[in-house]
Amino acid sequence: MGNILTARWVDVLEKARHEAEAIVERLAEAATQRERSALASQGAAARLRLQRKLGRYLVCLGHGASNLNEIFYHQMQRDIAGRYRLQQCYKKLGYPDWPADMVRDLEEFVARLGDNQRRARLLGTEIDAALEDPRWAAQIIE
């Protein structure tokens, strides 16, 4: 009788261990998926921030907002102090799509700026801050 109870006890323990392992595996996979989703969200937020700051810089140049990527390209080709900064933007964004609502926001933004505010934007400090956003590192961690 003792051997039968021992065998049952071992079987029950083995079944419980397998069930616990399966639960832990499912929970670990769910945590990994949540982490990947959060990292992707952080990367998207950093990208959006940089695109907005780049857009503000480009419209402050005074060429309008109708073809931002063309302005972006020409500015990267110029021998200007901000060239490296713009090349860093290109490495992170490529030539971004500029949704109509973002272009409209950029046009409204630049229309509200005074000359000194516009010149201050052209210093590029906002772009530098967006390039150094710690959320970019979230993409590397994956």
Image: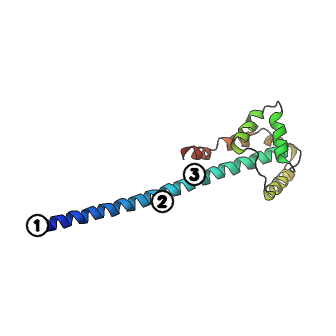
Q: Quadrant of the N terminus?
A: bottom left
Type of the residue with mark 3 = Leu
Give the crowd class for mark 3: few <14, some 14-19, many >=20 residues within 10 Å: many
Q: Of callouts 2 and 1, which one flags the residue occurring earlier in the amino acid sequence?
A: 1
Q: Is residue 88 above or below residue 110?
A: above
Nearer the camera: disc 1 or disc 3: 1
Badge nearest the viewer, 2 or 3: 2
Circle 2: residue type: Ala
Identify the residue under disc 1.
2
Q: Secondary structure at mark 3?
A: helix
Residue at screen point 16% across, 64% down: 6
Counting residues from the start of the chain, the first of labels 1 and 3 encountered is 1
The three-letter amino acid code for the residue at tag 1 is Gly
Please state if 139 lies on the left or on the right of 112 as rendered. left
Confirm whether residue 128 shows in the render.
yes
Q: Which mark is residue 39?
A: 3
Q: Helix, strand or loop at disc 2? A: helix
Q: Is 6 on the left-hand or right-hand side of 137? A: left
Task: Say few, some or many: other residues with alpha carbon within 10 Å of mark 1 (under 14 / 14 to 19 / 20 or more).
Answer: few
Q: Give me the disc on residue 26.
A: none
For disc 2, the neighbor class at 10 Å (few under 14, some 14 to 19, many from 20) is few
Residues at marks 2 and 1, CA–CA distance in whole angstroms? 42 Å
Q: How did the renderer colour the structure?
A: rainbow
As drawn, the label of residue 30 is 2
Question: Picture quarter containing residue 17?
Answer: bottom left
Q: Nearer the viewer, residue 25 or 51?
A: 25
Observer-nearest of 78 and 108: 78
Measure the C-alpha gap from mark 1 to mark 3: 55 Å
Describe the element under mark 1 as helix, strand or loop.
helix
Whichever of callouts 2 and 3 sits on the residue coming sooner in the sequence is 2
Q: Residue furthest bottom?
A: 1
